Image: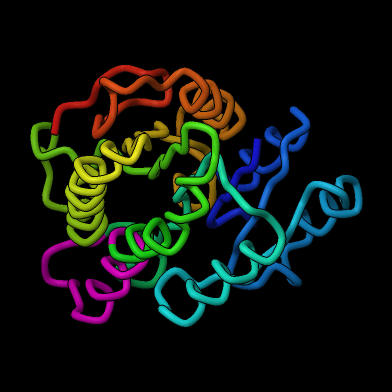
């Protein structure tokens, strides 16, 4: 299995990288500053033959193009793309919410670029490699916060809107890549104890990663375009 993972330097992305490597797969692990990602560097020492570290800022077109070119120089196909990179802007010092009265234009633009537009453009850039792979699958990490049905609070404004936009982008993508033999799904990884999720979250990244890898393995054609939990249950749009 040849897997490309964005936001691989910490949290869920790091755990996905570790578990895929432990399975014996080849992983292209992308992050903004891989040379400063200590845990990724440790994994590379252990799995030097199967782990490739790549610089990637999903909010920059030239960075996406460079990463895609780097992968193409090392493999002729990819089987799985996991769009995991994401941001959760802080509205104020020590405030992990995005509340009315504290919203800013810059936070809104950055969040949309990283959480919604970036994953779409990464998928587009890697599409030729995914088409050459074995049942190419695109799993984009969304959130229950992006569900219009479940939305019952104001904050977090930008994060929720960006994940809803990601859902639409990737469902649109599914409608096209399905005809190419590929699958694109959205995944709610649950509330995890990561830097983004905080210490009060209910589950470990290792559990979500294990479920997402299993989900990628078991996806079938009629699930193309679905919004699923890490356990494979459908999430309302």
Q: Quadrant of residue 44?
A: bottom right
* Residue 26 % position (x, y): 72, 43
In which quadrant will I find the N terminus?
Answer: top right
Q: Is residue 17 magenta?
A: no
Q: In the image, what residue occupies the spot 52% across and 40% down?
A: 80
- Residue at point 87%, 49% (across, down): 49
Residue 208 shows in this picture: yes
Left or right, 109 with respect to 3, comes to left
The region drawn magenta spans: 98-116
Foreground: 108 or 176? 176
Q: Residue 155: horizontal and vertical position, in percent?
A: 18, 53
Q: Residue at x 78, y 32 (%)?
A: 24
Percent from the top left, x then y, of residue 142?
33, 43
Q: Is residue 95 visible?
A: no
Q: Quick one: quadrant of the C terminus? A: top left
Q: Residue at x 12, y 65 (%)?
A: 100
Measured as percent of width and height from the top left, residue 13 is found at 58, 47
């Amino acid at each position: 299995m040849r897997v490309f993972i964005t936001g691989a330097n910490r949290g869920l992305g790091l755990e996905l990288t570790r578990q895929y490597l432990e399975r014996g797969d080849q992983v292209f692990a992308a992050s903004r500053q891989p040379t400063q990602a200590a845990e990724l560097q440790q994994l590379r020492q252990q799995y030097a033959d199967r782990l490739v570290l790549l610089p990637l800022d999903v909010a920059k077109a030239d960075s996406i193009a460079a990463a895609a070119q780097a992968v193409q120089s090392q493999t002729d196909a990819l089987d799985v793309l996991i769009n995991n990179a994401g941001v959760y802007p802080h509205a104020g010092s020590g405030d992990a919410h995005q509340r009315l009265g504290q919203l800013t234009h810059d936070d809104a633009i950055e969040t949309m670029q990283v959480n919604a537009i970036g994953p779409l453009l990464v998928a587009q850039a890697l599409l030729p490699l995914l088409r050459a792979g074995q049942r190419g699958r695109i799993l984009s990490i969304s959130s229950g916060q992006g569900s219009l049905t479940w939305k019952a609070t104001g904050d977090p404004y930008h994060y929720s809107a960006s994940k809803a936009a990601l859902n639409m982008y990737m469902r649109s993508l599914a409608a096209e890549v399905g005809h190419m033999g590929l699958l694109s799904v959205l995944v709610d990884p649950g509330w995890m104890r990561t830097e983004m999720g905080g210490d009060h979250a209910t589950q470990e990244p290792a559990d979500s990663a294990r479920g997402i890898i299993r989900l990628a393995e078991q996806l079938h054609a009629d699930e193309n375009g679905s919004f699923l939990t890490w356990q494979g249950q459908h999430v309302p749009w």
